[in-house]
Amino acid sequence: MSEIKYIERDPLYVVAPSTVSQTTKRAGKIIVWSSFLLMFVIAIIQTLHSNERISFGFTNWRPVLYAYILWAVAIGYSRVLIYGERGKRNLFVFPAVMFIISIVIFPLLFGLYISFTDWNLSSIDGRKFNGLDNFYQMISDPYYWNALKNMIYYVLAVLVEFTIAFLLAILLNSQIRGRKFFRIAFLIPLMLSPVAVSWMVGKSMLEQRFGPVASFARWLGWDTPTFFSNPVIAKLTMMCMDAWTFIPLMIIMLLAGLQALPKEVLEAAKVDGANKWTLFKNIIFPIMLPVSLTTLVIRIIFKLKLADIIIIVTAGGPGGATDSVTSFIVREYRDRSNVGYGTLLSFVYLIFIVILMTILIRFVNRWLQRAS
Amino acid sequence: MKNNLSEKIIIYGILLLWTFICLFPIYWTATTSFKTAASVTQGLLIPWIDFEPSWKGWRNLGFSPDTLFVESNPREEFLARFFNTAFISASASALAVILGSFAAYGLSRFNYKFGFMRNPDISFFFLSQLILPPVVLALPVLVLYRELDLLDTHIGMILIYTLTVLPIVIWIMRDQFNAVPIELEEAALVDGASVWMSFFKIVLPIVLPGIASAFILCLILCWNEYFLAALITSTDAKTMPVMVASQISSQSIKWWNMAAISAALCLPLIIVAIFLERYIVKGMAAGAIKG
């Protein structure tokens, strides 16, 4: 653990009487190292026990976890002992950093290791290191690449959602009565659990015999409305269901941006005789650009996690046409319970996401700089 | 004037159409939960006029008037899941709000150096957790939880849910704290308060509405979470979405049951949306404007 150091001139400047005696400093160090030693000893005992080298030990790894928590608390407390007033400031950020490191970084490192193993959770053999075998299997796995391709379509659908959300946000921002009612009504789909939506919309309203949407489609003249048997239609249906739940989020974010528009500029443009379209194109849209881009980025982040409705409604069918990467990995894990291969797939997906988001954010920043 | 009127009609037309799209599935679910098999197959829509409502779906769940006061296993089961969900999501949101508010306050008031990381890097480190898809963490965490005996426990679920909502809290709260004038705390510090005391006594009351928004947003996300819950829980800590999802495959023909149980899953959050809309909107808008 490297130290959270204090550097000059904080926004909130505190004149701190920071004279810490040598004894308390030493006490702080002793606390950290002794608790670390305790954790280390427990971990060694447990490792030996689980390798069946020694007979005594614990039934599971929980004591190690407790020792780890004790160690983390000791580090936090020692900050105050060693650095005095400065240490107290560190305590604001320290718990959150420690929490994320414990729950993200450790599992990620562990996951990196198991992604190079052949590990079937239900078999008794345990894990076997198999080097790059998982990777070669991935390269020749058409379903994984198909799932990635689907994700591209799903992400592109965000643009359509954005257009709809922008239109609705502008309408909500115009001079209308009952804005509060509309706002609540528009918000409600976001409140619904994807699991409930899967049944309400996916399984019942789109049901081909009795579902109201199917009846409506028949009334419009589509004789055999099936929403999940044709690959293209199935994918579009999935996009619509996901859009339905998440358009409210975009509406609210865009509406917040519209309400923050400078009134004087809009008035001045109206006085100059700008019509609605030029007003939108030359003034509203450019000023809204940062908000729009933030909204899009947030929406894409959520879109990349898309899984629940697919797992429940189609399970990726027909023929993998609606698969998202997450739903595919889940199936891979449920059907073959191969943790190693599934983890490798998810790590490759993470790498793709990080590359995509880096490019996207850099592109957004450059665009914003050029616009301003 | 005529132009204006037709414009109004178009605006209200689109708004009402979208309202219909938003609310019809809820209306459909609510009415279907009162249907019998015959009314389901005929696709009837309006209660009392098209079909005679029945308590069939709710009776199976133990929530109809005649079963409400007799013992009912499905109701016990449902209530157990309901309290699991409520307990896990409330605890996770509270933990995330506490950790996240401290971190956001620290980042908005002090300069840190954590190895090579300065304040903007630390902020980015927190926010970047948002792009981490749950599936990447799911399998390693599953294996880790098995070793730690945390599978199917409340505490295990709370920890992982806290993680998923923590970046959102930090994102919202950072702007909230930045909007509080520093002079207020400086005055308190001059009067001899410590940093933590001025945080609790002065800053916290000012940002309380922001904290409420963050808490409600977290609550919604945790309440609806299915993916991680399906992997980690099996019996003791099973949440409502997992229970509903498992019934979708087993009871798919009994629409009235499914409708009742889906409605019960959604109802709490619809009520939250109606009464706390202001806070939800505020939380989401906070993220949009400052970016």
Image (cartoon, grey):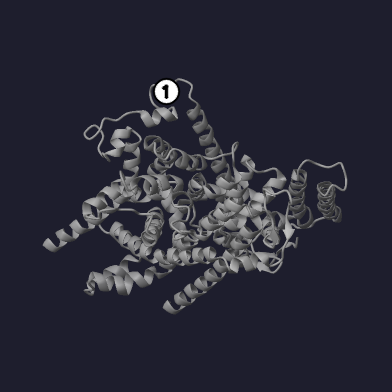
- Identify which residue is drawn at 20% across, 58% down: B10
Q: Position of residue A191 (x, y in %)?
A: 42, 47
| Residue for badge 1 | B67
* Residue B70 drawn at (x, y percent): 46, 20
The total number of labels drawn is 1
Instruction: Give above or below for A55 relative to A143.
Output: above
B96 is higher (above) or lower (below) than A114: above
Q: Foreground: A285 or B105? A: A285
Which residue ends up furthest to the right in the rendered image? A54
Q: Position of residue A304 (x, y in %)?
A: 50, 61
Instruction: Residue lying at the far bottom in this picture: please name it.
Output: A370
> From this viewpoint, is residue A96 visible?
no
Residue at 80% of width from left, 56% of height from top?
Answer: A20
Q: Residues within 10 Å of mark 1 (few under 14, many from 20)?
A: some
* Quarter that holds the N terminus of chain A: bottom right
Left or right, B71 with respect to A277, comes to right
Residue drawn where x is 58% and y is 59% of the image:
B129
Relative image position of residue A231 (x, y in whole percent): 40, 61
Task: Give the residue type at disc 1.
Answer: Thr
Tell me what residue is drawn at x 41 percent, y 50 percent: A190
With B175 as the anchor, is A62 left or right in this view? right
Farthest residue in the left direction? B2
Which chain letter goes with mark 1?
A: B
Would residue B176 appear left or right of A343 to someone viewing this image?
A: left
